[in-house]
Image (spheres, grey):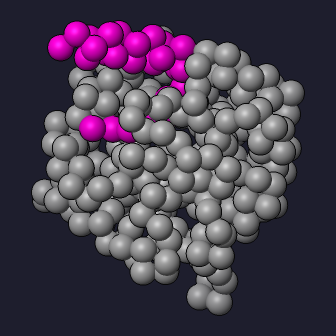
Amino acid sequence: MHWQTSRFAIDLSAPKVMGIVNVTPDSFSDGGTHTSRDAALRHCERLLKEGADILDIGGESTRPGAFELPVEEELVRVLPIVRHAVTLGVPVSVDTYKPQVMQAVLDLGADIINDVWALRWRADAESPSGMDVVRQHSNCGVCLMHMHRNPQTMQAAPMEGDVVQQVLLFLEQSAQALRGLGIEKARICIDPGIGFGKTVQQNFALLGQQAALAPLGYALMAGWSRKSSLAAVTGRSLASVATLDIRDRLVPSVTAALLAVQNGAHVVRVHDVKEMVQALKVLEAMRQHS
């Protein structure tokens, strides 16, 4: 399987590591760390040295309770980083749901649009949607994620019922809507949206039953890195993001991502690239002798 993007056909015969580059002051685990242009550029280059296959750049936090960022501010944060990242020789993804930002980064040469809203968001009924932007682009890749409700309300009222079947149906319908616009299947990746409007139990149901998404036939991304569900099952307090020690979530994050790969994920989106690459090498060594 390949994931077709603007400049690259990404070979998914082996799992790929997507390194997270947050240029936000308020992301839940690394907000404010890479907000300056130079710090963000250095972080891109560090992630590549550690073995990242793809860079994922985001200018707006979508953590639970986050509020919408003005388009102009997101562009100020993201465009300088994208402009440099596209010169580094790897696929560049941009984590955004705003069509104006999508268009701007694609014009700079970005390869992938990674959208928590699955291209559904629009400023108003008269404005273009993300689907309009992607449809007009000849070859960009797109990742469609499942999110219940929106960042302001998703954890206040999480999903109910059979989460796996609901997520599967949503992703199937979202991808089919793109296919109906002429978007090739190879350009589409799906993401079950761990932590986006799900309870701890529902998140782990999605991990344990992740193979149910395989028959859809799309590239599959897993985003477990530093999620609060990992803290919940390892005994760490969830009382305050301010008390978060990312070291407490390193091993659980890598473990969950590795399990996702074993259950069919093609791409893992992570903060801790070096450790993830090492874990995948161990998995590959085992597979070669099994």
Horizontal relation, residue 164 to residue 99: left or right: left
Residue 265, magenta (yes or no): yes
Q: 153 or 186: nearer the eye?
A: 186
Residue 193 in the image, given as x and y percentages of width and height: 37, 49
87 sits to left or right of 282? right
Which residue is located at x 35 percent, y 27 percent? Answer: 257
Q: Is residue 163 left or right of residue 254?
A: left
Residue 191 at x, y = what percent?
38, 50
Query: What residue occupies the far bottom of the structure in this picture?
Result: 126
- Residue 282, image x, y percentages: 35, 10
Q: Please state the total of marks drawn on the protein image.
A: 0
Residue 221 image-quadrant placement:
top left
- Residue located 42% across and 63% down the image: 185
Indicate left or right for 128 with 207 as reference: right
Mark yes or no: residue 26 visible.
no
Residue drawn at (29%, 48%) of the image: 198
Frontmost residue, 106 versus 65: 106
Would residue 14 be visible to someone looking at this image?
Answer: yes
Residue 133 part of the magenta-drawn span: no
Q: Position of residue 81 (x, y in %)?
A: 80, 40
Residue closest to the eye, 265 or 286 = 286
- Which quadrant is home to the C terminus? top left
Residue extent of the magenta highlight: 264-290
Reply above or below: 170 against 55: below
Location of residue 28 by image quarter:
top right
Closer-to-camera residue (227/100): 100
Picture layout, residue 160 above or below residue 22: below
Image point (24%, 50%), residue name? 214
